[in-house]
Image (tube, rainbow, N blue to C red):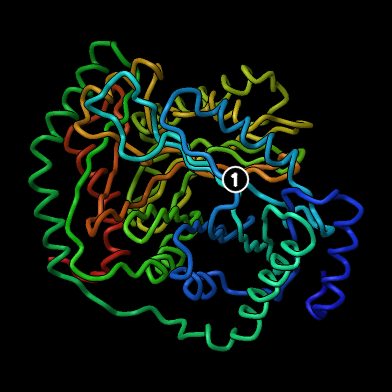
């Protein structure tokens, strides 16, 4: 659709397609191209109008904002990846496009958020988040390169309800276009400093370190005894937020200060929001290109990168992930893959060892791939099942969405999933921070504690923007 399309022609085109494709009732999707917009500004403009929203922004890929739910499923039982697959198949089978999409990026998308683990056999660690959330958004704004689209999904019964849906998408289109000048704000970031909050964080971190040292020591001993080859253990800190959460401002800071990441939000409602900037993409698939990412081994960005490249401990930690990803490809009967060179990639104040694995495949089932890949040794350990059992034993909290898969699948089967790390959860006026460290043979207690602190600080500073925390 062209940006200068008028409503009469748009209405006529959609009605004409409806007559050809739909008997009278059905699940339909309508898309219109819009001028290229700033996602932050649009998100800020609409975020309080809708209870549910999700935000996904990459510098070199598809970005989107989703509002409200057209179709959804929430699961608290087993077989989450199978249920997600069924939800995906059923809704894309029934969804009827009433407009032509000339670019792959504009295709309909279903978005997903999983929990880290099911923990079905451990009532003490039952998570307070669903094991699966799958949503076909009612409203979807997609951005790719310099192109933007607005899409609306809905169930219609006859032309009367179809016209209501068309009028709604047209009204949103006009809001974005006509009020664009009102959305434009200063590009400079707010210079707010919240030293009391930073003090609360540092105090909480100091108090939690006593227990954390005991847990990490247990992990080191498990590795030394050969019970595990690797385990990733995490710490969680919860502090009271005394001011209103300025989510869009935080996202802007994350984009500026943590480049190469994917900024993400899953806003269940105004009191429950998961957000962050993940450096780790579990996989992405744009036919026929499949890319997996091994990300493990950590150093402060202001350090000497050669130290990380020569660190036997970090290389060992990283290689567990590479070997695991390759094994998962082989399980999926994908053997024609190519492994890139190991390098150090920076994500703001933190840098990691990174290796990309590429393959060309005709098609994949993203949920079968997810079932094999998650949780990888980058966030769990090796062997996987044994490491997962020890994580549930040693950590005093359910991970919930920390280190869990979040992503999307489109109507053609293209997909992309990140690992929800380097973030926080705003929940009932508190903010929960979670960060972990990978333990292998050669791990040193103090170094692992310092790594977790570094990861905590990387997100805390973006939220409270403390230039010189005490």
Q: Residue at x 57, y 33 (%)?
A: 84
Above or below: residue 310 compared with residue 251: above
Q: Relative to the observer, which residue lies in front, 355 or 258?
A: 258
Above or below: residue 358 compared with residue 176: above
**Place of residue 319 in the rendered image (x, y in percent of width and height, measured from the top left):** 46, 27
> Which quarter of the figure has residue 88?
top right
- Total labels: the figure holds 1
Compared across the picture, whether 198 is left or right of 98 comes to left
Q: Residue at x 23, y 69 (%)?
A: 466
**Place of residue 223 in the rendered image (x, y in percent of width and height, measured from the top left):** 27, 18
- Quadrant of the frame with the C terminus: bottom left
> Which quarter of the figure has residue 196?
bottom left
Q: Is residue 102 visible in the rendered structure shown here?
A: no
Q: Relative to the observer, which residue lies in front, 122 or 30?
A: 30
**Place of residue 87 in the rendered image (x, y in percent of width and height, measured from the top left):** 61, 35
Label 1 crowd bin: few (<14), some (14–19), many (20+), radius 10 Å: many
**Place of residue 310 in the rendered image (x, y in percent of width and height, measured from the top left):** 39, 36
Compared across the picture, whether 116 is left or right of 210 comes to right
> Which quarter of the figure has residue 435?
top left
Above or below: residue 147 compared with residue 178: above
- Quadrant of the frame with the N terminus: bottom right
Compared across the picture, whether 352 is left or right of 150 comes to left
Q: Is residue 80 visible in the rendered structure shown here?
A: yes
Q: Residue at x 75, y 31 (%)?
A: 363
Quick one: which residue is furthest to the bottom in this view?
A: 181
Q: Residue at x 46, y 64 (%)?
A: 255
Quick one: which residue is furthest to the top in this view?
A: 226
Residue that carries the numbered disc 1 in the rendered image: 408
Q: Relative to the observer, which residue lies in front, 394 or 121?
A: 121
Q: Relative to the observer, which residue lies in front, 122 or 343?
A: 122
> What element does badge 1 sit on?
strand
């Amino acid at each position: 659709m062209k940006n200068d399309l008028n409503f009469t022609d748009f209405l006529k085109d959609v009605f004409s397609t409806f007559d050809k494709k739909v008997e009278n009732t059905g699940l339909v999707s309508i898309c219109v191209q819009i001028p290229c917009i700033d996602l932050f500004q649009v998100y800020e403009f609409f975020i309080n109008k809708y209870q549910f929203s999700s935000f996904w922004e990459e510098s070199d890929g598809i970005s989107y904002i989703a509002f409200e739910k057209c179709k959804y499923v929430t699961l608290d039982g087993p077989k989450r990846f199978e249920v997600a697959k069924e939800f995906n198949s059923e809704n894309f089978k029934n969804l009827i496009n009433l407009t032509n999409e000339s670019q792959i990026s504009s295709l309909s998308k279903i978005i997903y958020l999983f929990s880290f683990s099911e923990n079905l056999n451990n009532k003490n660690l039952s998570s307070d988040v669903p094991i699966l959330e799958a949503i076909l958004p009612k409203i979807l704004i997609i951005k790719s390169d310099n192109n933007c689209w607005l899409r609306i999904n809905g169930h219609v019964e006859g032309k009367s309800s179809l016209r209501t849906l068309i009028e709604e998408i047209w009204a949103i289109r006009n809001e974005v276009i006509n009020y664009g000048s009102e959305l434009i704000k200063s590009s400079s970031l707010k210079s707010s400093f919240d030293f009391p909050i930073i003090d609360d964080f540092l105090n909480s971190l100091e108090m939690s370190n006593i227990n954390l040292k005991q847990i990490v020591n247990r992990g080191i001993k498990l590795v030394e005894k050969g019970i595990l080859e690797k385990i990733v253990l995490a710490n969680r800190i919860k502090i009271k937020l005394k001011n209103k959460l300025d989510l869009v401002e935080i996202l802007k800071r994350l984009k500026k200060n943590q480049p190469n990441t994917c900024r993400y939000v899953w806003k269940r409602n105004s009191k429950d929001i998961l957000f962050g900037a993940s450096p780790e993409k579990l996989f992405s698939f744009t036919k026929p290109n499949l890319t997996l990412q091994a990300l493990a081994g950590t150093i402060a960005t202001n350090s000497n990168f050669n130290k990380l490249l020569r660190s036997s401990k970090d290389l060992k930690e990283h290689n567990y992930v590479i070997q695991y990803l390759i094994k998962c490809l082989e399980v999926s009967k994908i053997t024609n893959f190519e492994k890139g060179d190991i390098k150090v990639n920076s994500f703001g104040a933190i840098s990691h060892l990174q290796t990309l694995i590429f393959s060309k495949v005709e098609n994949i089932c993203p949920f079968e791939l997810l079932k094999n890949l998650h949780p990888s040794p980058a966030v769990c350990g090796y062997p996987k099942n044994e490491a997962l059992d020890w994580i549930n034993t040693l950590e005093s909290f359910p991970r919930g969405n920390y280190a869990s898969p979040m992503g999307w699948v489109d109507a053609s089967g293209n997909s992309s999933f990140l690992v929800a790390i380097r973030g926080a959860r705003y929940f009932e006026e508190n903010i929960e921070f979670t960060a972990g460290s990978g333990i292998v043979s050669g791990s040193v207690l103090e170094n692992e504690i310092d790594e977790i602190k570094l990861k905590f600080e990387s997100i805390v500073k973006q939220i409270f923007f403390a230039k010189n925390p005490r």
